[in-house]
Amino acid sequence: MPYYLANLINHKKDFNDRYLLRAILLSGHIIDQSYSQVIGVYSETLYIGYGLTENGGVTAIFPNIRRGDTIVTGDVGVPCEGVEIKIIDDTGSTLPRDHPGELCIRSRVAFHEYYKNPEATRTTFIAGGWFRSGDIAVITQNDRIVIKGRIKNVLARGGRTIFPEAIEKVVNKMNEISYIVVVAVPDKRLYEEICVCFVAKPQIDVTEDDVKDFCAQHFEVTNAADGVGYMPTYFLKFKEFPMLDSGKPNRKAIQTEAVHRLGIHKEN
């Protein structure tokens, strides 16, 4: 899992025995350039995969990434053989390349239905046998899939749609940060506000104000036409994140704790 690899990246021990692995395959998280740090230290190459159990496991692959190669954040490569993809908007209409929308997949090895759950099957499939992934993505001009985030994680701040992953990408540039999760918290005026939750690297003293100052250098409300912008409002430091069995941070639990610590009531 990517978060396990992040632990390796943060590990300071210098290994003389290089290339312990021939390759590392990453999946289940939006991958950016920072993960290339393992190349030449823990493995010779890096692979990025994207897939869902419902569609046979692997939908797309970005293979054989080597030292010096560029990783565009969210790039999971091209569809595997036998896999069709398209992007749709809220009405179900197909969008052109480079326009973000929901990624839909059609494959020869896709599952038929959810076991004893016809409602889930009905809402997941659309006309033509296309499976709705629940991921926001774009298809580039050269047929690459770039994942932007999960639909269920999207924040509605005023009239602006914000992908938490876009903010996480920026804050991850702080060398002092080990893990970051951006969640929505209720707000009377804007409906939802942005809360940056983070875990500092071991033995590193970084405060909530430090992260706020860093964000202030990268997100400016005054540059936004709607006056809302991307600058987060709240910052919370965690000793550690609650994790799912998959190894990913439990966003729902983190959001619940954030709302509690901020003293915000859901009914607001």
Image: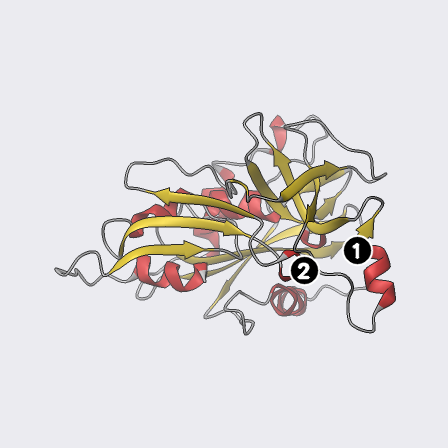
Q: In the rendered image, which quarter contains the C terminus?
A: bottom right
Q: Residue 139: horizontal and vertical position, in percent?
A: 62, 33
Q: Mark 2 belongs to which amino acid? A: Glu
- Vertical placement of residue 54 versus 83, above or below: below
Q: Is residue 28 left or right of residue 55?
A: left
> Looking at the picture, does residue 208 appear above or below residue 93?
below
Residue 54, which numbered label? Answer: 2
Of the 4 image quadrants, the one containing the N terminus is bottom left
Whole-percent x, y for residue 207 in the image: 43, 58
Q: Residue at x 83, y 74 (%)?
A: 116
Task: Determine which residue is flagged by label 1.
Answer: 124
Residue placed at 79% from the left, 47% from the top? 189
What residue lies at 74% left-to-right and 50% top-to-bottom? 132
Image spot of residue 138 (x, y percent):
63, 35
Q: Nearer the viewer, residue 47 or 231?
A: 47
Badge 2 density bin: few <14, some 14–19, many ≥20, Cα 10 Å? some
- Whole-number angstrom distance, CA of label 2 to CA of label 1: 10 Å
Residue 3 vs residue 67: left or right?
Answer: right
Residues 111 and 131: in front is 111
In front: mark 2 or mark 1?
2
Q: Are marks 2 and 1 in contact (CB under 8 Å)?
A: yes
